[in-house]
Amino acid sequence: MSKKSVENEIKLKRAKKAVAEATPYGCAQQLMAVMQNNMPFAATVGLSCAEILKFIEDGKAPKDKTFSQFVAVLCNEKQHSLHNLYPSEMPPKPFPVTSLVIAAFQVLDNAKLVEGIKADLVPTLVKDKLTIDIHTDPANIKITERGKDYIKNASSACNMFSSAATYGPGFAKILVDEVAYIISLHKDN
């Protein structure tokens, strides 16, 4: 066996072990650690979630198979907006859009902000690669009362009159609060 195939075999064994040991509670805690340790990522996901929810509430989100692409474009736009606002605090290389989309879908679903999106917290192995199972039903995506509250919190904490010093951190805090809610739902499991 070549060195590369041995390395791949080791990675696959680690991935299988991670999937076997993963729980929704543990994965929610990992999501929280990512958000708390990476304010730019949390702010980007938080701002993206607010925009997605607002588009859904206003009936402007696509109700067909382009919904996921719409979310990806929106997440990327929010990332660039925050990069322009915080050029020294954002990483020089953009976050992978896939990571932003997965995190946004996980929060939207697991914090019960919408109906019609299913995004597991626990990864699965598909063709020897870790993946998150995500399903959307764009024609039936609806905002919940919690989703409406998220929009209200985002609007009051982070409006166009917010200073740059509070805008990004405000969205990060709102998102961290939602991840804390997700953790509370899975704590006894």
Image: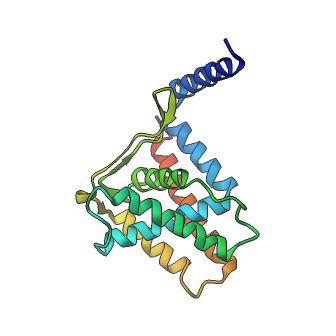
Whether residue 180 can be seen here: no
Of 62 and 157, the residue lying toward us: 62
Q: Position of residue 134 (x, y in %)?
A: 39, 45
Residue 35 in the image: above or below residue 26: below
Furthest-right residue in this view: 88
Furthest-front residue in this view: 2
- How many marks the image carries: the answer is 0
Residue 85 in the image: above or below residue 181: below
Furthest-top residue in this view: 1
Tell me what residue is drawn at x 54 percent, y 50 percent.
Answer: 99
Residue 81: which quarter of the image? Answer: bottom right
Q: Position of residue 104 (x, y in %)?
A: 48, 56
Residue 113 in the image: above or below residue 123: below
Of 40 and 161, the residue lying toward us: 40
Tell me what residue is drawn at x 46 percent, y 66 percent.
Answer: 74
Whether residue 19 can be seen here: yes
Q: Position of residue 80 (x, y in %)?
A: 59, 69
Q: Position of residue 88 (x, y in %)?
A: 76, 70
Is 85 situated left or right of 51 in this image? right
Furthest-bottom residue in this view: 161
Q: How is the image coloured?
A: rainbow
Tell me what residue is drawn at x 62 percent, y 59 percent.
Answer: 41
Please state, as top left, top right, bottom left or bottom right, where the N terminus lies in the image: top right
Of 133 and 186, the residue lying toward us: 133
Is 180 situated left or right of 169 in this image? left
Tell me what residue is drawn at x 46 percent, y 59 percent.
Answer: 72
